[in-house]
Image (spheres, rainbow, N blue to C red):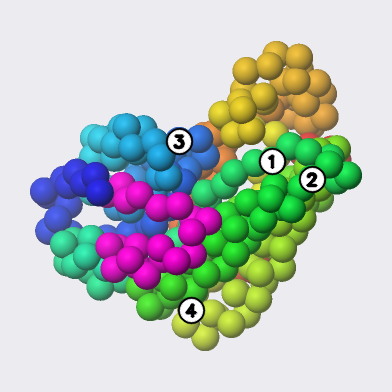
Amino acid sequence: MSVQTNESVDQQTGGKVALITGGSRGLGRSSALHLAAAGVDVILTYRATKDEADAVVAEIVKLGRSAVALQLDTGEVGSFDAFAEQVGGVLRDWGRSTFDYLHNNAGNSVAASFAETTEKDFDALVDVHFKGVFFLTQKLLPLLADGGAIVNVSSGLARFTTPGAAAYAAMKGAIEVLTRYQAKELGVRGIRVNTIAPGATATDFGGGLMRDNDQVRGYLATQVALGRVGEPDDIGAAVAALFSDDNRWLNAQRVEVSGGQSI
């Protein structure tokens, strides 16, 4: 566990706290920084990139908030009990018993056609993108504050189709259905649940193709009404906005953040 705490923030136990899975890089990192800039303390998880997670924690502290990085493989459901105990310990250290925002962001990718997708590939996607989200959220419910919010991550690929993404997109379709059920069942606690669906975004996800390949970026830019691929800050800002009390009446929605891709 990597911890850095802003001592002045420690006294402000009434502030908001967000838990972001996969917060060490890419879209998760951007979401963490945007939330911190909005005055939210952050618990973020990383699977293997501890150095990157430590760097994000340090950036959050520079913004005047408290942050902790915890190791978690969201595809390992058997680890969720111990993880929830860790989260509870962090909250107690911060004078809290609950956190306010859950961002199920962690992900992995498999690029294969429908005909070539193996059962192993399929299971790897299910474990992280659907089963992990389902059961981690379930496990954390006792720690999620009434009146809080959840933002799950889908993809533009659940609306438009690109060869080689059948299994991945199917998982995201499942997340969109799950989001509506969560919103319905958790509404009694005042918890709202929405899905954010990024379009083509320049990160290292999937080997960094959309970030590093100029030909791919150029082609995708022609498919977007605003004429470019997205950047992590485009998505992070939208995530922070979804959590904001300004959007307190937004619930059970799929919000695509794609610049108008494939419309």
Residue 83 pos. (x, y %): 35, 62
User: Which numbered disc flags the more N-terminal residue, 4 or 2?
Assistant: 2
The mark lying in front, picked from 3 and 4, is 3
Q: Is residue 249 above or below residue 15?
A: below
Q: Amino acid at mark 3?
A: Arg
Q: Amino acid at mark 1?
A: Val
Q: Is residue 213 above or below residue 183?
A: above
Is 249 colored magenta in this rendering? no
Q: Which residue occupies 69% across, 50% down? A: 120
Residue in the foreground of this view, choosing between 94 and 49: 49
Of the numbered discs in the image, which one, if any, rests on residue 190? 4
Q: Is residue 88 above or below residue 217?
A: below
Disc 2 to disc 1: CB gap under 8 Å: yes
Of the numbered discs in the image, which one, if any, rests on residue 110? 1
Of the numbered discs in the image, which one, if any, rests on residue 117? 2
User: Which numbered disc flags the more N-terminal residue, 3 or 4?
Assistant: 3
The mark lying in front, picked from 4 and 2, is 2
Region of the chain picked out in magenta, as a range: 68-87
Near mark 2 (Cα within 10 A), the count class, few <14, some 14-19 or many ≥20, is some
User: Which numbered disc flags the more N-terminal residue, 1 or 4?
Assistant: 1
Outermost residue to the top: 214
Residue 115 pos. (x, y %): 88, 44
Q: Based on the displayed image, in which of its 4 quarters is residue 90 positioned?
A: bottom left
Report, in whole angstroms, how far the alpha carbon at label 1 lies from the one at label 4: 36 Å
Report, in whole angstroms, how far the alpha carbon at label 4 lies from the one at label 2: 40 Å
* Residue position marked by numbered label 3 in the rendering: 25
Q: Based on the displayed image, in which of its 4 quarters is residue 160 positioned?
A: top right
Residue 63 placement, left or right of 142:
left
Q: Is residue 184 visible?
A: yes
Near mark 3 (Cα within 10 A), the count class, few <14, some 14-19 or many ≥20, is many
Residue in the foreground of this view, choosing between 211 and 18: 211
